[in-house]
Image: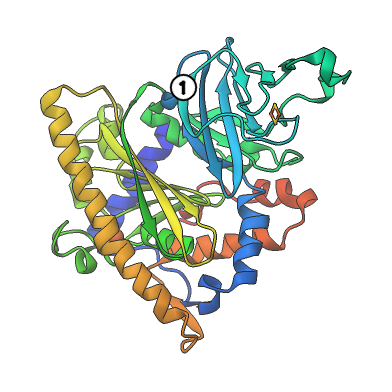
């Protein structure tokens, strides 16, 4: 089914390429400039978006084996993701039930138990409290009440989503809106994590807007990617998640071949975003490597950081590793010195308050949809979140014709 959807998108793209058109939004959209720096707005985004919707926090290939774990902080919450002996994924708040110490240091590893560095209480891979140091001295407690606090978690398409609210009733599959079946076409579960880097940036939305924006490519990146990059974008949406690609005349070459021979690399091109903070960038000709960017808000509205994950379909040999590192260096340079350097200045300019709104053109549908979803989620109460995502039409661009 999802491959059929990929083929449908390729045909849609080719039709636009031949006609020289794109799908335009009905109008130019205004967004309040203060959305990018107002403290109250930012807090709402943290509390009502980042702490309520599932976040893609880890790739399956980071913790492939039983006993593997990843500890990290997401929006101030210490998170521990572990793979049990049965290969099932679990997620917890990385906080000890004794007096709240953070148990595992950030990073990945393999262990059969999680032992707190403060007084050595220990927990198994399912979060159960299995060891209390000097229990006779400590006194009796009901251990079954003092396991690690579990977080909702799901592993789909070689990626792991965690919801930071332990009481969330939002169904992760409802939130994914079928998008994971498309992402599954990459086969990320068997890929190889080549390298990870961290880049500091401006307000998380200033940074994230750029990942959905092809309009700037031949302009801002004229010295690096080159002016031959397309500036026209097509957007396909599954709930709040969007694929961005360009009308591609080279797809015409595919039409000569039977559909089941159309190559996945071509069908999967472009940028795949996962709401609210992930971008998967594919590379021309080398569809066997991607850069997956995870954007995290910092501690104030003016800052964010991005974890860049460079994944390869297979572990590279020496030569491939050298080429991959060169490409990754270039990507980091482009994001840091072109996108985020521009964004940091944009941030300061917006914070003067002199301009009260910014614009997204009829050609920038990705931004329209992203900002509309932010507002809708912020306005929705916990009990209605499932309905909000369930009511979104699948693959909107195609269903709209
Ligand atoms: S806080 Fe973890 S054992 Fe005391
Ligand atoms: Fe860019």
Side of 288 where 343 appears, left or right: right
| Position in image of residue 76 (x %, y %) | 59, 48
Looking at the picture, tell me which residue is in the foreground, 268 or 166: 166
Residue 374 location, quadrant: bottom right
* Residue at left offset 55%, top offset 46%: 394
As drawn, 169 above or below 305:
above
Looking at the picture, tell me which residue is in the foreground, 398 or 349: 349
Can residue 235 be seen in this snapshot? yes
Q: Which residue is mark 1?
A: 109
Which residue is outermost to the top?
85
| Position in image of residue 306 (x %, y %) | 40, 50
Dot 1 falls on a residue whose secondary structure is strand
Looking at the picture, tell me which residue is in the foreground, 34 or 177: 34
- Which quarter of the rendered image does ligand 2 occupy? bottom left
Side of 294 where 169 appears, left or right: right
The number of callouts visible is: 1
Can residue 215 be seen in this snapshot? no
* Residue at left offset 17%, top offset 29%: 321
């Amino acid at each position: 089914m999802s491959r059929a959807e990929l083929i449908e998108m390729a045909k849609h793209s080719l039709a636009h390429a031949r006609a020289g058109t794109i799908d335009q939004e009905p109008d130019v959209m205004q967004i309040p400039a203060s959305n990018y720096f107002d403290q109250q707005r930012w807090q709402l985004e943290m509390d009502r978006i980042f702490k309520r919707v599932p976040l893609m926090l880890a790739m399956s290939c980071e913790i492939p084996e039983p006993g593997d774990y990843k500890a990290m902080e997401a929006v101030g919450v210490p998170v521990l993701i572990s793979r049990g002996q049965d290969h099932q994924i679990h997620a917890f708040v990385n906080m000890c039930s004794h007096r709240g110490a953070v148990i595992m240091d950030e990073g990945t590893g393999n262990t059969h138990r999680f032992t707190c560095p403060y007084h050595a209480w220990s927990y198994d891979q399912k979060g159960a409290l299995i060891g209390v140091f000097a229990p006779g001295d400590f006194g009796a407690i009901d251990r079954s009440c003092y396991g690690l606090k579990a977080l909702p978690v799901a592993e789909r398409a070689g990626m792991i989503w965690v919801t930071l609210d332990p009481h969330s009733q939002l169904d992760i599959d409802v939130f994914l809106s079928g998008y994971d079946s498309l992402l599954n076409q990459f086969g990320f579960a068997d890929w190889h994590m080549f390298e990870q880097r961290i880049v500091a940036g401006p307000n998380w939305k200033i940074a994230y807007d750029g990942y959905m924006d092809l309009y700037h490519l031949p302009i801002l990146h004229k010295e690096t990617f080159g002016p031959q990059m397309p500036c026209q974008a097509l957007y396909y949406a599954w709930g709040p998640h969007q694929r961005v690609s360009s009308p591609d005349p080279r797809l015409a070459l595919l039409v000569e071949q039977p559909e089941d021979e159309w190559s996945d690399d071509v069908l999967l091109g472009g940028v795949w975003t996962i709401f609210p903070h992930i971008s998967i960038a594919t590379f021309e000709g080398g569809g066997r490597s991607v850069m997956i960017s995870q954007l995290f808000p910092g501690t104030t509205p003016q800052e964010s950081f991005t974890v860049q994950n460079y994944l390869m379909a297979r572990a590279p040999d020496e030569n491939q590793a050298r080429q991959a590192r060169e490409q990754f260096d270039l990507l980091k340079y482009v994001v840091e010195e072109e996108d985020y350097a521009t964004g940091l200045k944009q941030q300061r300019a917006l914070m003067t308050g002199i301009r009260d709104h910014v614009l997204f053109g009829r050609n920038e549908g990705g931004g329209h949809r992203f900002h509309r979803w932010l507002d809708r989620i912020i306005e929705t109460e916990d009990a209605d979140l499932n309905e909000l995502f369930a009511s979104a039409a699948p693959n909107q661009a195609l269903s709209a014709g």
